[in-house]
Amino acid sequence: MKRQISKSDGCPGCATGAITRRGALQLASNGFGYLAFSALAQAATSLTVQLGQPHFSAKAKNIIFLFMPGGVSHMESFDPKPKLSEMDGKPAKLENYVAGPNRKWLRCLWEFKKYGECGAPVSELFPHTAKHVDDLAIVRSMKSEFPLHARGNVFLHTGRNVSGYPSIGSWVTYGLGSENKNLPGYVLLRDASVPPGGIENFSNGFLPATHQATHIRDEGVPVDNINPADKDQRVQRAKLDALLQQDRSFLKQTSGDDAIESAIANYEMAYRMQSLVPDVLDLGKEPESIKNLYGLDSTDKAKRSYGLQCLRARRLVEAGVRFVEVTPPNLFGMNGTWDQHTELKKGHETNSFVTDQAVAALLTDLKSRGLLESTLVLWAGEFGRTPDTGNGDGRDHHPGCFTIWMAGGGVKGGVTYGETDELGNKVASNPVTIHDLHATILQLLGLDHKRLTYKFSGRDQRLTDVHGNIVQEVLA
Amino acid sequence: MRSLLFFFIAGLSVTSAQTDRTDFFEAKVRPLLVSRCASCHGDKVQMGGIQLTSKDGMHVSGTVVPGDPASSRLVQALRYNGKIKMPPDGKLGDSDIAALESWIAQGAVWPDTVVASVPAPAGYWAFQPVKKPEVPKVADATWPTSDIDRFILEKLERKDLKPVNDADKYALLRRATLDVTGLLPTPEEVAAFEKDSSPKAFENVVDRLLASPAFGDHWGRHWLDVTYWADTTGVGRRIPLREAWRYRDYVIRSLNSDKPYNLFVKEQIAGPDKNPGKGKKAGDPEDLAATGFLVLGPWAWFSYDRDQLRSDVADLQVDLVGRTFLGLTLGCARCHDHKFDPIPNTDYYGMAGIFLSTQTLSSANSEGGLNTVRMPDTLASVRRYADEYEKWEKDVASVEAAEKVNQKERDELKKRLDELKAKPKSDETDAEIKTVEAQFDTVKKRSGTAGDRQVLPFTKYMKPRLPEAYAAEDMEFPEDARLAVRGDAHQLGKFTPRRFLKSAMWGPEPEISPRSSGRHELAEWIADEKNPLTARVYVNRIWHYLFGDGIVATTENFGSRGEPPTHPELLDYLATRLIEDGWSTKKVIREIMLSHVYQLSSAPNDQGNEIDPGNKLLWRANRRRLEVEAIRDTVLQVSGRLNPERGGPSLPLTAQNVHTIAPFFLEEDSVVEDQVRNRRTVYQPIMRSGQLADVDILNLFDFADPDQVVGTRIQTVVPTQMLYLLNSEFLKKQSRILAAKLLKDDKLDDDGRVSKIILAALSRPATTRDFQQARQFLSDFKAGLEKGHNDPDPLTAAWARYCHAILASSEFLYKR
């Protein structure tokens, strides 16, 4: 046995529930292919704890996280600040990391309109998403701690500001197991770029490797090593048979070792995955109307890429993948595509052009298939942008307050939660920390953030560490 | 809420109310006070003078007014009604608050015992002095060949378990070679061992292996697993640490020279001894890199909140030292007294003070932001530096000159473009715009850029430096740490004198000089032969690497939440032997490998499976998978491509790989340089998260996360590993190389080739079954070929696939 795995009540550190090595193998294979050995199944029933079960029943079974890296301007998306227009051009004296003598307030560059029955205001940047406000719970009082992209992103994903901790996607697949034993539990859909913070944002940390994100790229070979080394299927099979024959002789000689048994089973599984994964990603059977809904008919390459990944997200959720994360094409610099210190107008407009239609399409599509009820959709970035400007042309990083939204599984639609001050500088009421957001997401998925633990380095680790309060007001 | 009231009222109605109130207090109230209040209002810290862990402390300024919850300030604070809101990190649940109110309403009964905030250390085994145990008597006197065997056999005999037969010679040689060097025995070594029937045959093998520099490569990597070492720093971004290799090489060198472990420990905490004393040899000057152990870590190199960053770094260092050397999870005591081990808050901050008085980060926000020291100059190093510097100046000048020319051209083209765009639209101007734009792009490409990455800033970045190492130094003004509430560097309590673990003391606490950080004293204390943990933790890891499980299975947690030792006497025996043998790592490994138990077969039997299915008592050898490094290294070894070069820098610092906007960092798609790629994995560049594509096998086969202390790597078996083995370029390419090598020898027939592959990859002679399987595959493949497979070299193609199947087989991936 390598490590104890447990899910327990109460105080961090009070874990019980050792599992056998066989159990560990079984767990390890849970997220990404299941071993259909009766011996393993027996071992699983003898576990003192059950994994892959929610703590309580919940509507959301899957989650799609639409990650918006770089820092979307909250004042110019979902949190209008008319006062900024009055103050436009006047000297601003804010206490933050960019504070300086020559900073000025900057008015909102886009107009707001009210939408839906709830009348939530949305800026012109998001005309498509705006039509769904009655399904959204908009949180305007988010707070983060780090004004830097890499740390902000890692904090948003892992709840920590040091390396080595599991991503929320890994926690969720660890907590809920996989619905489809032949597909990974945590999938990241991205273009060639990786947002600041790198692979670490999607890492399993100390959780078993099976919970790490499987990256699916928009172009080229979608998943590492998924394309068979030999194109000819007969050659493939002959090679695999030679290998399995070799393994079976070895297994006999070793009197049936469970690790060797699972190796054999895994080879068969890997062989099947070679065709299964491409099948799920194949849009051949999607009608044109659906493809066009996501913008796949666009002349813009980035827009097609993001639309493709959003449509794949739906297909993956449909196929039973627990946690799908989508990052947008990186069009501006290395710091996340929404990072407009300059050319705010051009940058934000390009990004909204690329993403808004597909995001709305995803909501529409999920809803029409009845999947929105069981799918939590989260739209969030690492921080917001400053209400003032240093150069008149852009805004800087602002972890002091920002906006995110959630929709679908278990979320109360048409709600706006939390307030910022009249200039969009600080949270004015109902602050929501990253830990609170994590606790709420887990709650929506049927997981108690205090009980979702993994014993590592002598204590029961949690996604929310020792923090986190559930935002009850956004729960349906 | 209702059930709570019910509990309370029901309690009152039965027997003595006083007893029930005490029960209620113990069940509901005390746990709340201890878990939510005591860290700031406990025995150690009493913020605002209020102590919630004693009867007297509670009554200070009306905090608790027995019988009157409404007037008790505690209740107001808990309800978040007034200005004071407690606990500050989040309101208690309603039922918890109600419980406290009920308790106050009923008179705030306080039983006459103190809140036990630290578990009693009394007799906990890991804190007892190491004593050489008596070697037990065993019934079967013929089986043991060493005292180690007697400790093992004694436990087996008690369970009526018989050890299995010995491993065959091939399995034993393969196991031993992989365990010591991480490589396979060569066909010649297999043949020599096969022939050697002397009683010393295996002993000679072990001695040969331990003397090989490959020992350091393999065991050095084991040590790196229990450090935070990597070639990059930063949270998220891969900021290259150009000198990090020096610590990696220090570790490997130390293991190869069999540096006494106590010295190895001291050097990594306090640095090499500058005055080794008369008659003693000064260490290698390169050993200055030893404290890279403390400096290289998963911390950000920059933060707007400098105090918190320093505090977080010191925290990670306390935890590192605790887990690596002492097998204790000291980090738990940052926010509260350790819940399970006798480690109070004050011990933690005592140690944190030592690291807060140590310079880890440099004050300048330079590359990496880590503290560096100059390596001692040698004539050669200064000369090399002068030459490199001269060359570098020329490089910069030439890139700058080229850039100037290009800039001029670009400006002119830009100007022309603007003019054209200002003209009225016509097909003619449109065509010209296109031409000029194309010209502009050509110039842009040639103008000192590689792709879209700038050559000039990169060239400047590569400015040569005199040799330096990341190393820790004492702060000019060492100071004690202050207790920080829940680790928050802005909520500070009392100063805590620098010190180490009280409950692991064997004599008076060592005094720490007020003029130094205390690292020296800490190092001496850890490396002392009387320290109850140091030697035990180390020999346990050695055992773990040779058997697959430690005597204490939780190699980094010897605390009460860890696993108890399966063979406590054996652990102490080995710890004593380590010290007796002058803290020699190699001697301990040698003694263990020469034991009978190490040489057992891994094949199980029914009796053993019945009585001890987990093989905790070691009635057989464990079948263990090769470490990921060994998988990669042995594939290269078998294909003949393993580059034997050792040591030195390995970061791929090229204009293509380095992103040249501050902070300069390595791109995700960085490519390892050719001269490094086929070296052993321990010499590949190691990122903090997500390894480079050239060593992406590390991402799949449970490589130790550099951000954690990983004595025991988790072992997963997942289909993505199999996809790698089946389809990766690496396996495909090396199989092809191996096949081509085999086919070069035209004296070999098919069976001869099979014999050769099996011997090289599986370290045993081929069997009839191997020949049959190979023939079967070759004929299957041929049949496949006839139906339209079009490889220009079908024979190599066939053999490449056969080799591939062998290299991906379990027998290759596991130690027999």
Image (tube, coloured by chain):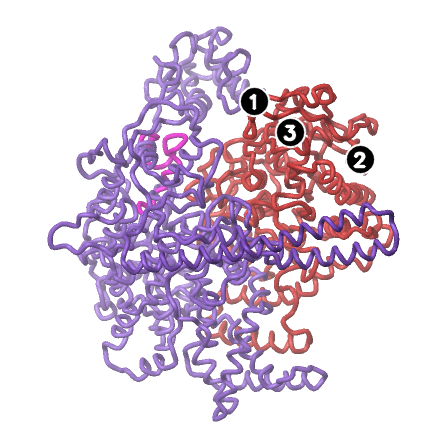
Chain colours: A red, B purple
Q: Residue furthest left?
A: B278
Q: Is residue B100 left or right of residue B286?
A: right
Q: Quadrant of residue B196?
A: bottom left
For residue B69, above or below residue B766 = above
Q: Secondary structure at mark 3?
A: strand
Kindly identify which chain the residue marked by label 3 belongs to: A
Q: Between B10 and B518, which is closer to the camera in this rendering?
A: B518
Q: Nearer the viewer, residue A283 or B689?
A: B689
Q: Chain of mark 1?
A: B
Name which quarter of the figure residue B778 lies in: bottom right
- Tag 1 near tag 2, CB within 8 Å: no
- Count of residue discs: 3
Give the left or right position of residue A389, taking residue A23 as reference.
right
Instruction: State which mark lies toward you, 3 or 2.
Output: 3
Q: Which residue is mark 1?
A: B3
Q: Residue at x 44, y 63 (%)?
A: B681
The amino acid type, in three-letter code, at marker 2 is: His
Q: Which mark is residue A254?
A: none
Label 3 CA crowd tier, 10 Å (few <14, some 14–19, many 20+): many
Q: Amino acid at mark 3?
A: Thr
Q: Which mark is residue A132?
A: 2
Q: Is residue B614 magenta?
A: no
Say which residue label 3 marks: A389
Distance from label 3 to label 1 (Cα)? Answer: 56 Å
Disc 2 element: loop
Region rendered in magenta = B324-346
